Each structure stands twice: as structure tokens, then as C-alpha cells.
Image (cartoon, rainbow, N blue to C red):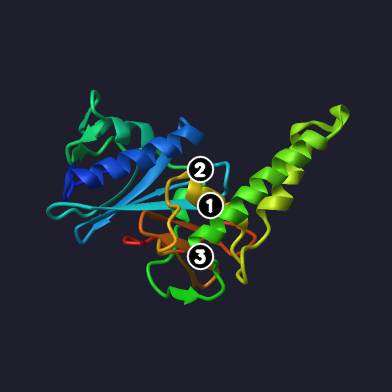
Amino acid sequence: MTVPVQSLEFADAREAADLAAFLGRLLHYDRAAAVRLQAGGGALAVFGRPPSFEVLAIRTARLRGSHDFDITVSAGELLESLDIDDATREAHGVGSLPAPVTGPPWTGVLPPRGGWHEQPGLPDPVALRVELSAAVAEFRSRDEALPADRRTRAERDLIGREIWLRTVGDTELPLRAVHAAQSLGFLRPAPDFPVALLASGPWLRLRTPFGSIALRGAGGGLGDLGVSVGVR
């Protein structure tokens, strides 16, 4: 696969730093994580799939100059390519594209570019965080209450699945999408922090200023839809 652009120049250092933070969180859940990169119109869309949550995570960054590519790369190699001062962890706004890799199946199943409509019924960010904290506490309580002979991975998975498949507010969004948003740094504890739930066909997307979480319907299966750039 030939990639016409080998270097990346971000609009400013903050864009590179935010992308580096996102990549670091993805790698926390999967040290071998791959990300799909799509660039066009001065923007870079980075798609990842943290395995613990069974959702797609989307982070965008503004680029300087004209870039047009679609490539799947190692998240770790992309993070290493960013020009970051190890002493201060300060990003300098430049990086390079690693060599392409054969992506996992999810990289061919991305949300659609258009057709998104805002959905009603989503609680505000503070209420979302309260509900999420209650769910985490419930999981820990139920896990600790398991008798010794049932304290297995399978039993814990059953508890987790029952809790994280619950929907939030008057929506079809599963709670695990909110959990993913917080874990990846997309959900911030401020009452005026804007969040929105959008839908396009079978896809749902929790959008915040710092990134989006997308999945196909409440069941969370990832079907075969077209790829796109600029999902925010």
C-alpha cells in the first residue's frame, strides 16, 4: 500500500498532545492496538477499538496543510512517531506515518460520514458520571458477594454484561459506551460540558468535544458500513 504523505504536521502542539493522550489510553487496554487513520480537508480522524468496551473510539485532530490518506497503523508506533519532549511530555505538533499494517476486522467497519441526527433523552454529563459511578460500585459489590466457588471470570463477565448493557436515560445507548467515554478521557466533570447522542441508521454515537464513542445499536454489533473522514 502506497501512502502519499509520510509526515504529519498538526495545526498546533495541543492537537498532537491530545492525540498522544488518546493513543496512550488505547494502548493501556491493548498494547498491540491498531488504529485506522483517515485524513482529508485539513482534519485527521483516528479510529480505535478498546477491547474492554466493544465500541469504536474516535478522536480527531486538525492538520496543517493538505493531507489525503487512509491507512491502518500500529497505535504504539504512531505514538512513538509524535515529537514529544520526554522531560516535559510536551508535544511539538509534528509526527510521521508508520508503515501500514494489516488491520483487524473492525477497521473495515466504520461509522457513516453523514445522516447523523441528534437523539433526545440523554442525561447531562454530571448525571452520566453519577450513573456510571453507581454502576462501578454495583459491580464491585456483586463481585465481592460471589461465593468462593463462583468467583470465576465467567461469573464476573455475566455481572458486567448485565450492568453495562443497561441503557442510559430515555435512549438506546448502553452504559458501557459512557464507561468507554470516561475511560478514554472524552467525558469531563463539568455541568456545562456539551454531550450529544446521535444516530445514523443502526449506528449510535456519543459525541463530546474531546472525541466520540460509536457502536451499532444497543446490541453493539459491528456490521459492514462504509468508511468516512471527519466523524466528530
Count neighbours of disc 3 (C-alpha within 10 A) and say few if under 14, some if 14 to 19, many if 20 or more: some
For badge 3, the amino acid type reads: Asp
Residue 50 is marked as: 2
For badge 2, the amino acid type reads: Pro
- Disc 1 is placed on an element classified as loop
- State which quadrant residue 7 falls in: top left
- Which residue is at 76% across, 37% downward? 143
Is 21 in front, or is 229? Answer: 21
Give me the C-alpha separation between circle 2 and circle 1. Answer: 7 Å
Asked if residue 18 is positioned above or below residue 174 in the image, the reply reads: above
- Which residue is at 45% across, 76% downward? 117
Q: Position of residue 144 (x, y in %)?
A: 77, 34
> Is residue 129 visible to the viewer in this orientation of the structure?
yes
In terms of sequence position, does the residue under pointer 2 or pointer 3 come before the other? Answer: 2
Q: Position of residue 67 (x, y in %)?
A: 18, 53
Asked if residue 126 is positioned above or below residue 97 in the image, the reply reads: below
Taking the view exactly as shown, the residue that stands out farthest to the front is 191
Asked if residue 108 is positioned above or below residue 153 in the image, the reply reads: below
Residue 124 is marked as: 3
Quarter of the figure with the N terminus: top left
Quarter of the figure with the C terminus: bottom left
The mark closer to the camera, 2 or 3, is: 3
Q: Position of residue 91 (x, y in %)?
A: 22, 36
- Which residue is at 16% across, 51% downward? 11
Give me the C-alpha separation between circle 2 and circle 3. Answer: 24 Å
For badge 1, the amino acid type reads: Val
Q: Position of residue 115 (x, y in %)?
A: 42, 75
| Residue behind mark 1 | 55
Residue 96 in the figure: left or right of residue 21 = left
Taking the view exactly as shown, the residue that stands out farthest to the top is 87
